[in-house]
Amino acid sequence: MKLLEGKTALITGAARGIGKAIALRLAGEGANIAFTDLVLSEATEQLEKELQTNGVKAKGYASNAAKFEETKTVVEEITKDFGRVDILVNNAGITKDGAVKRMTEEQWDAVITVNLKSVFNFTRAIQPVMWKQAGGSIINMSSVVGVSGNANQANYAASKAGIIGFTKSVAKEFGVRGIRCNAIAPGFIETEMTAVLPEEIRKSWIDRIPLHRGGTPDDVANVTLFLASDLSSYVSGQVINVCGAMNT
């Protein structure tokens, strides 16, 4: 039997990169997949079809994760369509990097709102669903930058550090109903976003990694599968670094 047979996962920001890899990995283990992106596009339509080849139900939804009421509405729609939600993966996020002395209020607010408030929005919206089910797994995408900080990424680091504090608090608050909450802190992951970096910057990152390679979206997806499944039934309130020992 597959690890997630009969379960439903909701993944935010899943049209590409890490979110897409997570959706495909969970679907491969039998999970029905509801996923969101800012707008529905050819990419989301293609992902729907790709997920459905696993014999599971899959549907994409347009949703701005940073908007509280919009999130509430889409979660209600997903619950109606799928009947239940067992796994929530808060993956949506953006970067607007810059030195603090030059960072604008817009850069700060945008990153905090999309990266951190979205995690609150979806967790708050899913709480009544999982509470009624007396179980569930919430997985929040943080970053090694949220654990140790990084120059020229104060807004991003603050948002990802906030996710860690939120995760630990939710784990203690929701545990009474058998709901687990954990965070993943990826390091340097080879995605479309990192592919456009100058080669010398990519090399400088990889040189800091003891495993001497960047991670892949599948590396993150495999840890997500562990936290989503009953293999981690006694794991809650934890932050798992997926960074090749870059951050120890």
Image: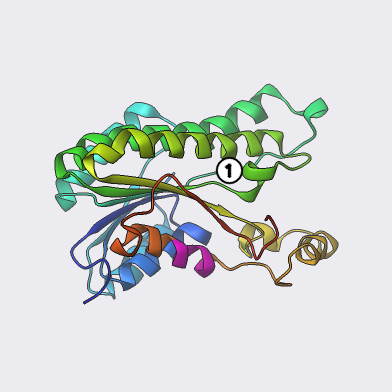
Work out whether residue 3 or residue 105 is closer to the camera in this orientation and state it.
3
Question: What is the three-letter code of the residue carrying label 1?
Answer: Ile
Residue sitting farthest toward the front: 234
**Which residue matches tag 1?**
94
Q: Is residue 208 left or right of residue 133?
A: right
Quadrant occupied by the C terminus: bottom right
Q: Is residue 222 magenta?
A: yes
Quadrant occupied by the N terminus: bottom left
Q: Would residue 126 be seen by someone viewing this image from the given angle?
A: no
Q: Would residue 60 be seen by someone viewing this image from the given angle?
A: yes
Residue 157, position as x, y percentages in the image: 65, 38
Residue sitting at x 74%, y 65%: 209
Q: Is residue 203 left or right of residue 225?
A: right
**Extent of the magenta region:** 218-223
Residue 182, position as x, y percentages in the image: 43, 48
Q: Is residue 86 magenta?
A: no
Find residue 194 and report its image quarter. Answer: bottom right
Q: Magenta region, mostly helix, strand or loop?
A: helix
